Image (cartoon, rainbow, N blue to C red):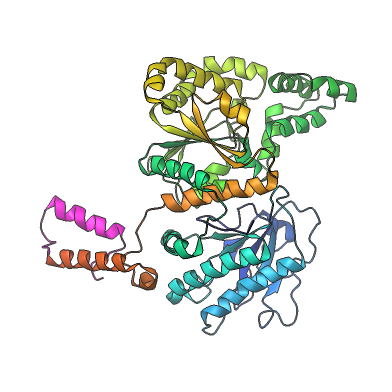
Amino acid sequence: MPGHLFICKCDITKIACDAWLLPTYAEKTIDLTWHNQCLEQLGACDGSLDAFDVGPDFGDQQKTALPKHWPEHPEYPMPILTVIGSKVKQDIQWYIDSVKQFLDAYSRQPSCFLSYRHRPLLAIPLIGVGKGGAGDRVAGIIDELLSFAQDTANERNVDIVLSVFDSIHYTVCQKHRKNLDEQRNFWSEISEQQRAYADNIINFARRGELVLFLGAGVSAGAGLPSWGQLLTHLTEKSGISEEQHKSLSGFNFLDQAEILKRELAKNNIDMNQEIVALLGAKQLYSLTHALISNWPVNEAVTQNYDTMYENACRDSKQPLSVIPYTFDENSDKWLLKMHGCITQPDDIVLSRSDYLDYDYTRSALSGIVQALLVTKHMLFLGFSLTDDHFIQLIFDVHKAVKGMVKSTGHKFGTVLTVLQCDLQQELWSGELDFISAGEPNAEFSAAINTHDIILDYITCRTHTSHRYLFRREFETLMAEEDIQLRDELRRVYEKLNTNTDSNAIADFKEYLQSLGFIDDD
């Protein structure tokens, strides 16, 4: 299976990957823009390069430097210091060579932060367009970088995520990738059947009918534990005997959590605070979070306690309200947290008693989810469909609208699974559709990659913005029909009397501005 190029609107310092390109420029310092937890631990937040193995030729022919002391089992993605700016004007290939040297440096000292992936995931920014000095050639940078990154991912058997922070640059990257797809076939790894199911999800998203349900598997992509792993951690903290530990495994997860809650309390340890300490330590988010945060989806539901999706949405410039905790009056986007949040430790739902109290304290939240199941199409990501509470919600909805389900074949949603499970699909055949990234006997890590590529395909195809249309610096990347449309719209505008009080003309002008038009264009 060849490597793949992902494109995300995200913060490169926060995405969970194996290594990332840490930019430095002509002055050879580390800008505050790139500071994160890892650089704090390396002692590199003062702008100096002392934490990196910088040789005498660094900045000239040698453009990269690795950290001086990097552990075999790192807690963070490895930063590779890379020169991407110069005091003199450089051609585009100079910038592409910086990325090549970054990849060469990783090959010399590979680091594995994401042990579950089939291939290393390496993150690069859209180089040269900020302080790098090539902002006037951004179209050429995008064109060369996309082709180079995809070819290199194939040749080196790595995955590359291009982190783009500027909204218009992100739109142009996705648009250009769509234009190149016919000849490049960027998503060759996914089958026709997988693509057909993904196209169905894309249609729901474009019509505003898609809602997301995020399970623990989404956050596991950034190193957070599954429910079972969380209980294992709590068991170790409780200090129970080995014999009790063996007995504990005979109980289901809810009762295990109830027992551990009481055992921890005997040692003056609050279970919810322990969960907060474990989950709140990581400030990264997964590739899945970075991809889906850019989808045109306003509603999402999760039973996860972490804040990774919220952070990814904020970094993609799509802030959201978090129900039932915060409200953003400037955003239509929201996330419903069914089982609490690490920002509100007392609300965390994990034990049997927590679940028994749920209907008394948060039945309104369940009602919102049930309404979404009836009125929207729910895409389940990283969710095992084994939670008794959620199963009850779907069962109640099915009973309430069974006539509609029977007469129309209506499905409440689609489940994207890593490996196909025929029995699970049969169990839920009346309520849910399934997209599987891999066959039942496929290698799990390889199926994870395919899973991410399906999400990347949806990300690109649901992004329909045309904010670049009147931006002259991107004309070389535009299709001929886009240029013709732009010129026709400009001619129509020039014939209008824009000083009138006409609402229609004002609306037309506002629409042109959404395409990048300005009066002196």
Specify whether 409 is left or right of 148.
Answer: left
Q: In this view, does 154 lie above or below 273?
A: below
Q: Is residue 395 above or below residue 161?
A: above
Q: In this view, does 188 lie above or below 372?
A: below
Identify the residue at the far front of this view.
192
Residue 96 horizontal/vertical position (percent): 57, 74
Residue 59 horizontal/vertical position (percent): 66, 80
Camera-side residue: 147 or 18? Answer: 147
Residue 123 horizontal/vertical position (percent): 61, 60
Camera-side residue: 50 or 72? Answer: 72
Q: Which residue is drawn at 66% across and 35% down?
A: 276
Query: Is residue 315 shown in magenta?
Result: no
Q: Which residue is drawn at 36% across and 55% down?
A: 465
| Placement of the C terminus among the 4 image quadrants | bottom left
Q: How many marks?
A: 0
| Placement of the N terminus among the 4 image quadrants | bottom right
Residue 247 horizontal/vertical position (percent): 83, 19
Camera-side residue: 61 or 44? Answer: 61
What segment carries the magenta color?
496-521
Q: Is residue 271 visible?
A: yes
Specify whether 507 is left or right of 11.
Answer: left
Specify whether 190 is left or right of 103.
Answer: left
Q: Residue at x 68, y 62 (%)?
A: 79
Q: Is residue 283 visible?
A: no
Specify whether 25 is left or right of 72.
Answer: left
Camera-side residue: 420 or 518? Answer: 420
Query: Is residue 509 shown in magenta?
Result: yes
Q: Quadrant of residue 443?
A: top right
Q: Is residue 375 above or below residue 382?
A: above
